[in-house]
Each structure stands twice: as structure tokens, then as C-alpha cells.
Image (cartoon, grey):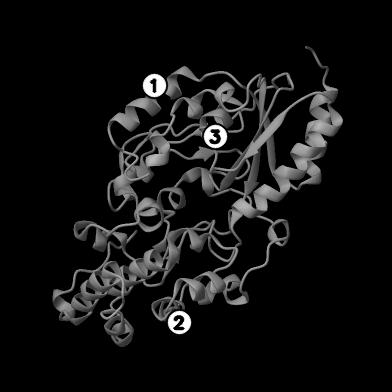
Amino acid sequence: MHFDVSVHKIIHKLAYEQSFDLIRISKASVLQKDKEFYLQWLKNGEQGEMAYLDRDPERRYNPAKILPGVKSIIIAGLNYGEKPTKISDNTKVNIARYAKNKPDYHKVFEKKLSTFSESLTQNFSKINAKFYVDYGPLMERPYAAASSMGFIGKNTTLITPQFGSWVLLGEILTTLEIPEETPQKHGSCGSCRKCLDICPTKALKSAYDLDSRLCISYLTIENKGPIPVKLRKQIGTWLFGCDLCQEVCPHNVRAQAYVPQKWQDITIEPDLKNSMYLSSIAFLKKILTIKSEQEFKIFFKNTPFLRAKRVGLIRNACIVAGNLGNRELLPYLENLTNDESELIREHAAWAIDELKKPLHGRNSPPIVQ
């Protein structure tokens, strides 16, 4: 099946209507090198407790296992970067940018991709389409790189010319055969290794190889158990996720800021839109006093924080409290030593011990230059 350039015009028009920042097309073929790397990564156990990544792995790298007859993959990108890009201050509470003062991007993406996919099937008859955000099985970053949206950096993120690595991805798999577009020019990491050098836990074992078990984002979000004691000081004040390997990336210096209006369809608690509040001791106190999962769900409705659940976020807050060194948090932590969750009790006790140490004997979180 052959189409002229008009098919691209239609697809880009549909993407524009949904306010996507980037749109590219990839062939729905098996990416052999990425397949081999992924299988070895799983074999090494670097996925940690994310067992779903090892479930039916062929669906990760073979789009035909997801949608029979698939011909093309439409990759959509949504910018979430902020200006200026600077190194996070470890004297404040830190939150990954995709979660800070924003609704859950899955909800934002789902609404846009659903409409996009429906419009696609209306414009081109007798085709099938299936959309996913990053909860889907597809290895989206390799396919985004194959589409020439950007390149995979040494920190394993997709780096785009317009927005650096501050890009969230979604995709539509379709049986529509779409000609590939003219490749974009983009840079490379060259000899730079800033991301590898700054990682406090050395989760970036080498260029392009991330060991999830050591990654602060994994430890504070996907990990449902205790945070290893040997890694707690290195986590510093990262409450939810971590951006360090992106903050030092030279490609992010000139990245364009995101447009908040594109995220306004999903409502969240007003306090959670306030960046100053989210960086404050007051926010930490709020988390440490949440009594139930129901209360947690109400306050954090429509936000990425729900992924950690009450126990996980309070666990993280205890680590941050211990590393901040602010003793006014002691009563809040002491109350948690009676919490029904053993995980919370243990992390609260650790934080209390840290705060009671003499100032000259307390190990400060790593200071980022």
C-alpha cells in the first residue's frame, strides 16, 4: 500500500489538534539490537522487582505480538520541561519534574491518544489501531529513536532537539502503512559523562546501561519494599523520582519549557500545583500525617504520587526527613513508630536516629555541584 505526502499531513493535523509537541512515524519492525540488549538486561536482573517487564518479553520488541498486521507506529511526544534547568537544591524537598505541580501524565495522554486514535480510524477506513502510554508493553524509546524523534542518551533517556530529554511518550500502533519521514538531524553525547558522574547511587553502571535496582526513581516509586540502608543517604531529599542525570545534561540547557495549558484538562488538589509548597517542610509534614489509604487517594487524586501508595510515599518522606536534618520533624516521625505498617515504622525509626545524631556526626546527603 502506498500513500503520498498527504497521509503525513493528516496525521500531523490530528496530532496538532491534540496539542502534542512532537509526532514521528516508525516502521513496526523488530529492532534487533534493542531486543538483544533488553533480553540481556533482564538476564542481569537489572529490572529489579518490576516483574511485568519480564512477562512475555517478545511483546516489548515485536509490535506484531501486540497488534496483528501492524505496519506503523505513530510516536507522540509531550514536553514537560521547565525553565531554567538547574541542579536540584538538596536543602529542599525534591520531586521529579514530571510529577511536580502536574496531573498524572497517563491521564493527560490517554485522553489525547484516544481521540487521536479514533480520528485516525475515521480518516482511514478499514484499519485497526491501538494506543498506549508507558504502561504498554512496547519499548517506546527505541522506537522513538528509530523514528528520528531524537537519540538515546547515555542516561538512557530519549533526547530530542527541541525539548532535550524532558519528553513523555505515547504511541499508536496501526495497520495503516505510513511512509517513513525524512530523518531529523540531532546531536549525540560525544565524550560527555556528566550523567554517569552525578548519579549518587551509581545506577548508571556504564553508558546506556541503567541498573533499576540502584536508581532513585525506581527505589522511590516502583520499589514497594524497604529502601536499602546503604542507599538511604544517597537518596538525599528526593521524595518521588529523581532528575539528576537529566539536570546535568547539556542538551537540556536550551530545551523549551512546557505549556501548562496542555495539562489543564485534569484537575488536582490546588496545593499540589504550588511548587514552593511541594519543596517545603509543610508538604513533608502533610505526608507524614496521612492516616489512611483513602485520605491519601483523596489528597493525591489524579497525580503521579498515587503510584507509590500511602506506605511508599511516607517511607520516602521518612528518608527525606532524616536527610534534611530538620528536628521539627521529630514529633511527626515519632508518631509513625506506632503505624500499622512495619515498613513505615522501620523507616521512621531510621529517620529519628539520623535526626538525633550530633550535627558534627551526621552524614549530610551528597552535595551536588
Instruction: Please give left or right for residue 112 compared with residue 132 in the image.
Output: right
Instruction: Please give left or right for residue 299 compared with residue 194 in the image.
Output: right
User: Dot 3: few (<14), some (14–19), or many (≥20) neighbours within 10 Å?
Assistant: many
Alpha carbon separation for disc pair 3 and 1? 16 Å
* Tag 3 residue: 140
Residue 83: percent from left, percent from top:
58, 59
The residue under the point 44% across, 64% down is: 309
Residue 152: percent from left, percent from top:
48, 33
Mark 3 touches mark 1? (CB < 8 Å): no
User: Dot 2: few (<14), some (14–19), or many (≥20) neighbours within 10 Å?
Assistant: few
Label 1 residue SS: helix
Instruction: Please give left or right for residue 38 compared with residue 202 in the image.
Output: right
* Tag 2 residue: 282
Q: Amino acid at mark 1?
A: Glu
Q: Earlier in the sequence, mark 3 or mark 1?
A: 1
Residue 67: percent from left, percent from top:
62, 26
Label 2 residue SS: helix
Q: Amino acid at mark 3?
A: Glu
Tell me the quarter of the picture where residue 81 sits. bottom right
| 3 relative to 52, above or below | above
The residue under the point 78% across, 38% down is: 118
Label 3 residue SS: helix
Residue nearer the viewer, 216 or 311: 311
Residue 206: percent from left, percent from top:
30, 35
Residue nearer the viewer, 220 or 81: 220
- From this viewpoint, is residue 99 visible? yes
Q: Earlier in the sequence, mark 3 or mark 2?
A: 3
Q: Tell me, for residue 71, which label it has, or none.
A: none
Q: Amino acid at mark 2?
A: Ala
Q: Earlier in the sequence, mark 1 or mark 2?
A: 1
Residue nearer the viewer, 301 or 252: 301
- From this viewpoint, is residue 90 visible? no
